[in-house]
Image (spheres, rainbow, N blue to C red):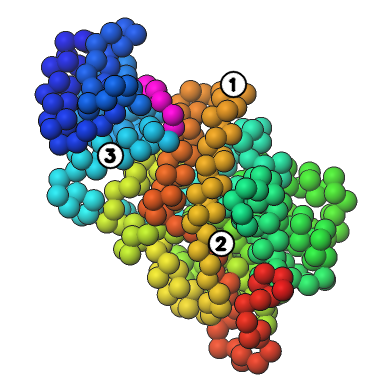
């Protein structure tokens, strides 16, 4: 393999060095005995070791998708800190692109049938509860935390996030709350215990359903919380006073957002409030004209996931019969959350690896680190959109935003 790799890599490495100075070493052969560096540094911060010659086409024209594919398929190993590795992957991809190379690739949209959505959700969320428990907080909240100082623990930030949402929607004792994509039940448990709400939580994940029901039983709240293995489109026992959707609408699909918001409107009382908390694209064309590792995410992490731009969220929300009342950008908060997830995942490698195969471990390792980089550099964002049924009278609404912060 050595001569094949050398003949392919050396000319490419020389061309890359002429364009950019990177602290990256490429190595091949047993124990990396042959190598070339892509910059003039005393000690490269990242080493890419070629394990298999089939990695060459993916390396010589590197993109985030191809570099990620080579890594998770075990064709290359990477050494260095995860932030350095992800940063160098972006630098390699940027310098491999021709002028305008970030544009011009249309991503296909998905059909999002009930069957395909259920399959996609179970692929991502049903790795195992034990796996998620290793790197999430104690309540296993798998969404953006909320930080007031940035110094909070992950557990503190997740409780703050749930309280922030429930305060925003003005949840009152006895009100009926629907949580779409309830995960392992943290929000509905908090809503019932602290706010006195009657809650319904729906999920398509078997593992989440089982553990959430177990937690409800353990808390003695079966009379106030109903956990269902159910598609949100099949919820028909309206009306609800309040509806929350946290980290779920990324799975809805661009072509289905108006219908999604329309169903929320149908389920909501005329004087009700709803909160949509979800990741968005920073590409004005809903991520359809930007590379950004999209194929890697589609293939390995979130099958059928589609991220709308905020403008699309607001347009389809209005088409669905809802009025956007308050919008809050939480990109910095998700940057911090994913950094903490990635750090914990890395620190608990010895405990996590026995829970899944090598390929799945590599997928999640690079995915979490890549998310932290993407939120930090405004490649993706996240918004909380507080909304209410459109066309209702404005009388009785708060004049200021003080109530959102419990003042």
| Location of the C terminus (image quadrant) | bottom right
The picture quadrant where one finds residue 215 is top right
Marker count (numbered): 3
Q: Is residue 342 left or right of residue 272?
A: left
Foreground pick, 233 / 45: 45
* Residue 232 in sight: no
**In front of the other: label 3 or label 1?**
3
Magenta stretch, residue numbers: 74-82
Q: Is residue 175 above or below residue 102?
A: below
Residue 26: image location, x then y, percent: 26, 21
**In front of the other: label 3 or label 2?**
3
Q: Which residue is mark 3?
A: 91
Q: Which residue is mark 1?
A: 350
Near mark 3 (Cα within 10 A), the count class, few <14, some 14-19 or many ≥20, is some
Q: CA distance from mark 3 to mark 2?
A: 31 Å
Q: Are marks 3 and 2 in contact (CB under 8 Å)?
A: no
Near mark 2 (Cα within 10 A), the count class, few <14, some 14-19 or many ≥20, is many
Q: Which residue is mark 2?
A: 277
* Disc 3, SS: helix
Q: CA distance from mark 1 to mark 2?
A: 33 Å
* Residue 259 in sight: yes
Q: What residue sits 29% from the left and 21% below the top? A: 42
Q: Are marks 3 and 1 in contact (CB under 8 Å)?
A: no
Outermost residue, right side: 220
- Is 202 inside the magenta-drawn segment? no
Q: Is residue 236 left or right of residue 328?
A: right
Q: What residue sits 55% from the left and 35% below the top? A: 343
Residue 108: image location, x then y, percent: 32, 54
Sequence-wise, the earlier of marks 3 and 1 is 3
């Amino acid at each position: 393999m050595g001569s094949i790799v050398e003949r392919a890599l050396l000319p490419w490495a020389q061309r890359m060095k002429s364009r950019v100075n990177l602290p990256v070493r490429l190595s091949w052969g047993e124990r990396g005995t042959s190598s070339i560096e892509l910059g003039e540094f005393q000690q490269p911060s990242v080493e890419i070791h070629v394990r298999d010659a089939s990695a060459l086409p993916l390396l010589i024209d590197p993109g985030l998708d191809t570099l990620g594919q080579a890594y998770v398929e075990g064709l290359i190993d990477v050494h260095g800190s995860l932030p350095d590795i992800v940063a160098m992957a972006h630098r390699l991809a940027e310098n491999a692109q021709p002028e305008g190379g970030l544009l011009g690739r249309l991503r296909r949209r998905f059909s999002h049938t009930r069957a395909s959505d259920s399959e996609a959700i179970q692929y991502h969320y049903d790795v195992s509860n034990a796996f998620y428990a290793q790197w999430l907080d104690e309540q296993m909240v798998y969404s953006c935390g909320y930080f007031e100082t940035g110094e909070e623990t992950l557990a503190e930030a997740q409780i703050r996030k749930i309280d922030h949402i429930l305060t925003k929607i003005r949840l009152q004792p006895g009100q009926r709350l629907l949580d779409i994509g309830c995960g392992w039940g943290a929000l509905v448990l908090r809503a019932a215990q602290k706010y006195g709400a009657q809650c319904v939580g729906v999920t398509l994940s078997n593992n989440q359903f089982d553990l959430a029901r177990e937690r409800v039983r353990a808390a003695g709240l079966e009379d106030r919380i109903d956990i269902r293995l159910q598609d949100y489109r099949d919820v028909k026992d309206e009306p609800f006073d309040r509806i929350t959707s946290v980290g779920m609408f990324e799975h809805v699909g661009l072509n289905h957002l108006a219908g999604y918001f329309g169903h929320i409107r149908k389920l909501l009382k005329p004087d009700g409030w709803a909160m949509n908390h979800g990741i968005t694209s920073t590409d004005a064309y809903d991520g359809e004209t930007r590379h950004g590792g999209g194929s890697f995410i589609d293939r390995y992490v979130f099958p059928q996931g589609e991220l709308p731009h905020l403008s699309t969220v607001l347009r389809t929300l209005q088409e669905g019969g809802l009025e956007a009342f308050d919008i809050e950008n939480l990109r910095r908060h998700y940057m911090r959350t994913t950094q903490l997830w990635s750090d914990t995942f890395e620190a608990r490698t010895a405990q996590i690896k026995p829970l899944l195969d090598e390929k799945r471990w590599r997928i999640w390792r690079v995915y979490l680190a890549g998310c932290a980089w993407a939120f930090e550099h405004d490649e993706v964002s996240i918004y909380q959109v507080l909304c209410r049924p459109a066309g209702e009278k404005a009388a009785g609404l708060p004049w200021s935003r003080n109530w959102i912060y419990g003042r």
